[in-house]
Image (spheres, rainbow, N blue to C red):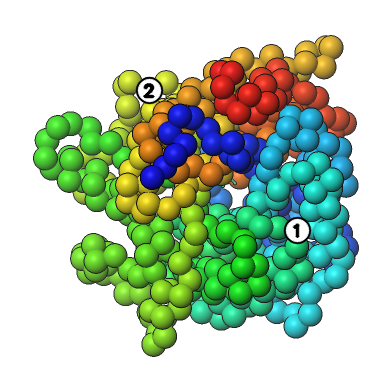
Amino acid sequence: MNKNNKGFPKDFLWGGATAANQIEGAYLTDGKGLSTSDFAAYKDPYAKGKVDNFTFNVSSEELKAYKENPDDYLFPKRWGIDFYNRYKEDIALFAEMGFKTFRLSISWARIFPTGLEDEPNEQGLEFYDKVFDECKKYGIEPLVTMSHYEMPITLTEKYNGWVSRQLIPLFEKFARVILNRYKDKVKYWITFNEMNMNLNSLYTGAGVLADLVDDPLEAAYQASHNQFLASALAVKAMKEIIPDGKIGCMINQIESYALTTKPEDQLQALKSNQLNYFYPDVQVRGEYPTYMTRYFEDNNINVEMEEGDAEILKEGKVDYVAISYYMSHVTEAREDASKLAGTFDSPIKNEHLELTQWDWPIDPIGLRISLIKLYDRYEIPLFVCENGLGAKDELTADGKVHDDYRIDYLEKHVIQMKEAIKDGVDLMGYTTWGCIDLVSCGTSQMTKRYGFIYVDQDDKGEGSLERYRKDSFHWYKEVIATNGEKL
Ligand code: BG6
């Protein structure tokens, strides 16, 4: 029985979330190698007249041009927000808000610069030691994502990323190194960030140059299969190395609603949701769900599997399911419906929802629906490890940001999480996305801000990098202090 159905449990993990490639900067410092995210060139998101939420896909031609003439482009993820040098100040601000946990990722290329070395880069390991020690100083539990949208670029150039099985042992080596190194400092882990985004962001999610594969959809499922195996091996390793640790899988949870009550539309909504659930289905249950057999046949997808894969998946079941949650979708029975599941720019609008400045539908009740459905399906703990509002903020002359719109957005989502807990969901924690302003994943913009802390830097990397507390900083501090009672 879930005894916590009165509201947030006492040990609820409130905090914030980031990713190495969006905050650290220092892209070649202390032995770090180049990673895929170092080649996410800034493109004007307004070039087509309306905002373009592209998530990064890079072609082989583009990569060649970026390597040959780097000065012709801007690569904001190379400088991030200089967390590499300012982590003490930033963690102190998180502590001031009362964070119980801080989600961050480890850059694979900082530990193994090309991914191929036998020995890890000691200076890279030392950096995360310092970060975790700093968290510990304030009683903040780190929540570490092993792979958040980046990998050594060498693995893209040599193997075309995760379409190759060669990456599995390389990732396992990386996972074992970090698990052993940080076993006394990190108890909460996630293997891959939003693995379901491989379906529309092959380069970002899997380091794959899509123009070099015959069928990008098949490649996305092959890359996902290889990541499932790598993830399962990492789960197994964590259980050996950190017996009291907890390790989860993660998806970008986008609930698909049917446009009408027509059974055909309802059926499509069910199928679109299955395409999302596929990822936790494999990682929670340790095997492929039967519905994918037909989907693969209908779409001519052949995922190459080897003997022994089934056993690896069985032995690598996760302890909890983490989700990022930003929006819901609407679907209907139409040819391209499956392709649209999980994309950021759905052509079908939900007339009941308002949109963010980046046209993302705002749907707090969709979060509650998602949590209830996921918990019904798996009956293991859930974690909302990303949620937030990307918005333009204005810094006033006296160093304030009056972001009542962000407070409103977050408050509505916190209320729905609380309702979901009352509905019986076992929820471990909530880490809002981009607790400090960072470089956007999808657009590489700085102006798309999510933070409680304003960072003085623009899209081109100009600015003092000074940090300022926004109004939402004080609001969140109060939410944490009252364990979600004062909303
Ligand atoms: C999630 C990613 O999909 O969404 C984050 O895990 C990302 O890395 C976040 O930053 C918000 O997306 P964006 O494109 O607004 O930065």
- Regarding residue 168, the answer to whether it shows in the image is yes
Circle 1 SS class: loop
Badge nearest the viewer, 1 or 2: 1
- Regarding residue 216, the answer to whether it shows in the image is no
Q: Which mark is on residue 185?
A: 1
Is 391 located above or below residue 329 in the figure?
above
Mark 2: amino acid: Leu
Image point 47% across, 47% down: which residue? 382
Left or right: 269 with respect to 474?
left
Mark 1 crowd level (few <14, some 14–19, many ≥20, 10 Å Cα): some
Image point 32% across, 27% down: which residue? 350
Q: CA distance from mark 1 to mark 2?
A: 42 Å
In the rendered image, residue 27, in percent from the top left (x then y), is placed at 80, 56
Mark 1: amino acid: Lys
Q: Nearer the viewer, residue 425 or 221?
A: 425
Toward which corner of the image does residue 298 lie, by quadrant? bottom left
In the rendered image, residue 57, in percent from the top left (x then y), is placed at 53, 54
Q: Nearer the viewer, residue 184 or 57?
A: 184
Residue ID for mark 2: 353
Left or right: 337 with respect to 244?
left
Quadrant position of the C terminus in the picture: top right
Image point 48% across, 62% down: which residue? 318
The picture quadrant for ligand 1 comes to: top right
In the rendered image, residue 303, in percent from the top left (x then y), is placed at 36, 74
Q: How many marks?
A: 2
Left or right: 463 with respect to 374?
right
Quadrant position of the N terminus in the picture: top left
Circle 2 SS class: loop
* Mark with earlier residue (1, 2): 1
Is 365 located above or below residue 149 in the figure?
above
Q: Which mark is on residue 272?
A: none
